[in-house]
Image (cartoon, helix red, strand yellow):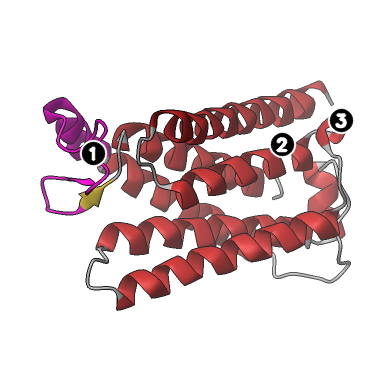
Amino acid sequence: MLGRAYVDGSLAAVALATAAYCAGRLIDAALRGRRVEHAVDVTHVVMGVGMASMLVSNLSFVGATVWMAVFAVLAAWSVLHIIVGSLSRHGCSHDAWHYGGHVLAAGAMLYMYNAPTAARDGMKMAMPSASQGTHPVTVAPLLATVLFGYAILVMSRIPAAAAVSTHGEGLRGDRRSFARGADGDVLPPAPRAGLVCDAVMSLATGIMLVTML
């Protein structure tokens, strides 16, 4: 159907654009010696490419099993960051909810790769599921709701990040520390862009789950 193809293509384009931007942030950081949240940007790159591969068959170069392994590692990596951050005296709440959102998004991708046959047919994913098991029908809308809620939480923090960017605290060439928001929480360089990418990826993943219903 033309409508379905348009939705899938649009989501894939958004995912790839976000991935390309985050890859550019990593390259810029390497060339100019700027400090960025490498784990966050790498996560967005992997999520973007993985989502596009799931949505558009021409972009699918590896099988579902490979992507499932990638997202499982991504989820474990994010959990590790949460644990290390909670044990470190320099840890902050930013790390916990930020990486928690990545665990949620990676889990949602794993669910979609293992979704029931009927749901996969409705979504018309580019790659078949690696599992033919049945899943509770409430899982997809529940995951989508939580992802949308997380995106709203992320967007609510953008004004504070904008204020930090305006004052330029620790944002340009400062390798010693991240900037701090109005609530004292640590924020990375170019915090608005990172938060926008996080919100976009969460919304896109949530929409993918909704299309399974």
Q: CA distance from mark 2 to mark 1?
A: 34 Å
- How dense is the environment of label 3, judged by Cα within 10 Å: few (below 14), some, or many (20 and up)? few
Of pointers 3 and 2, the one earlier in the residue sequence: 2
Identify the disc placed on residue 58: 3
Q: Residues within 10 Å of mark 1 (few under 14, many from 20)?
A: some
The vertical placement of 192 against 91, above or below, is above
| Residue under pointer 1 | 174
Is residue 166 a member of the stretch shown in magenta? yes
Q: What x and y, as percent, mark residue 137? A: 69, 64
Q: Which mark is residue 12?
A: none
Foreground tag (3 vs 1): 1
Q: CA distance from mark 3 to mark 2?
A: 9 Å
Say which of 139 and 40 sits in front: 40
Q: Position of residue 17 (x, y in %)?
A: 58, 26
Q: Can the viewer see residue 75?
A: yes
Which quadrant would residue 53 be assigned to in this image?
top right
Which label's residue is closer to the chain start, 3 or 1? Answer: 3
Q: Which residues are magenta?
A: 158-185
Quadrant where the N terminus lies? top right
In the picture provided, is 171 more to the left or to the right than 57?
left
Give me the residue at 49% from left, 43% from top: 41
* Residue placed under numbered mark 2 in the picture: 52
Circle 2: residue type: Ala
Locate residue 86 relative to residue 54 in the image: left or right: left
Q: Is residue 1 magenta?
A: no
